[in-house]
Amino acid sequence: MAHVTVRGLRKAFGAVEVLHGLDIAIADGEFIAVLGESGCGKSTFLRIVAGLEDASSGEIEIDGREVTHLTPKERDIAMVFQTYALYPHMTVRENIEFPLEVLDLGKVERSRRSNEAAALLNLEPYLDRKPRDLSGGQRQRVAMARAIVREPKVFLFDEPLSNLDAKLRVQMRGEIRRLQQRLGVTAIYVTHDQVEALTMADRVMLLNAGRIEQFAPPLELYDRPASVFAAAFIGSPPMNLVDSEPVAAGTVKALGTSIAIPDNITRPVTLGFRPEHVEVLTEGPGQFSGRVDSAENTGDRLNISVEVGQDLINVSISDRRDIAPGDTVALSVAPERLHIFDRETGRRV
């Protein structure tokens, strides 16, 4: 196991800066997910940690040793890529053992490590097959086994499941997490899929245009988003965000009605509330009402969009209702479910 420390990490391609001074500390054996939109810098960050890309400035330490200017081989890391990157002319066993040949380990030690890795990942029946004879999930297991045999201090994963179908992604993310916990190795996992990040990681580093928007455990990211960006990014359907104007101490106007907020907030704020926290009333007027624009039944949820003045409010309920586009519905949100963000900075109040 190893802890990873990053200080002031910056990366620029010419005049374009893609990483803006990242500072993070990852504990021994911790599983970190790096989450963000395409182009936010997450893969660049991972490649710099791996030594495949040079940083413009900053420092990287692995287990207390500075590795900023060391080669990938000298960093004691192993990386699993989005593409399996297997050698098609080699068998599964030969693919797994290849990094050990590069390290000039003896045949007995190579065989021992490859057998252990194959057993961990249920690859024993396939050791004599070529990659073309394997399914996508089996190929990804081979890529993981090839990383495991090096017995690295840190595992790096660059969107390893994006080429798999939805059902196999669910299976593989469970396998990766169980394997990481069994080995106790530190892991950094890059993904654009928030479900992967929230279900697999001990903490999630949410990147926004090369800056850390929030670095927190998954439930904290969901329950207490630090900014409008984090609030909008996490959750499906996404959090509702509506602008408000102060009316008096402890009261703002939004969605055509007065809404109570803490008395100490007197500046313009953005109110946030998740679709699943909106109540669709069967009786009474509710806090506000609107016209249903769309309704989607997914079996376990009914997701509707409601036009409330100029705002489109997402609502998600678990019980089945006879609600159709064109209907008028009354809605309510409990005060404790509101998230409040500064209109100017976008940060949580």
Image (spheres, rainbow, N blue to C red):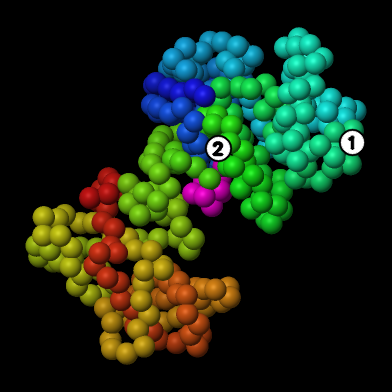
Residue tagged by mark 2?
181
Residue 187 in magenta stretch: no
Amino acid residing under circle 1 = Arg
Crowd tier of the residue under label 1, counting other residues whose Cα lies within 10 Å: few below 14, some 14–19, many 20 or above: some
Cα–Cα span, label 1 and label 2: 28 Å
Residue 341 at x, y percent in the picture: 27, 53
Q: Is residue 112 visible?
A: yes
Image position of 99 (left or right of 300) = right
Secondary structure under badge 2? Answer: helix
Image position of 230 (left or right of 150) = left
Magenta range is 190-199
Q: Nearer the viewer, mark 1 or mark 2?
A: 2
Indicate which disc, 1 or 2, sits on the residue closer to the N terminus: 1
Q: Quadrant of residue 101?
A: top right
Image position of 282 (left or right of 160) = left
- On residue 72, the disc is none
Residue 343 at x, y percent in the picture: 26, 52
Residue 193 in magenta stretch: yes
Amino acid residing under circle 2 = Gln
Number of labels in the image equals 2
What predominant SS class does the magenta segment belong to?
helix
Q: Is residue 200 above or below residue 267?
A: above
Secondary structure under badge 1? Answer: loop
- Identify the residue at horizontal 26%, vertical 78% (top origin): 287
- On residue 129, the disc is 1
Residue 280 at x, y percent in the picture: 38, 80
Residue 140 at x, y percent in the picture: 73, 39
- Identify the residue at horizontal 49%, vertical 18% (top origin): 62
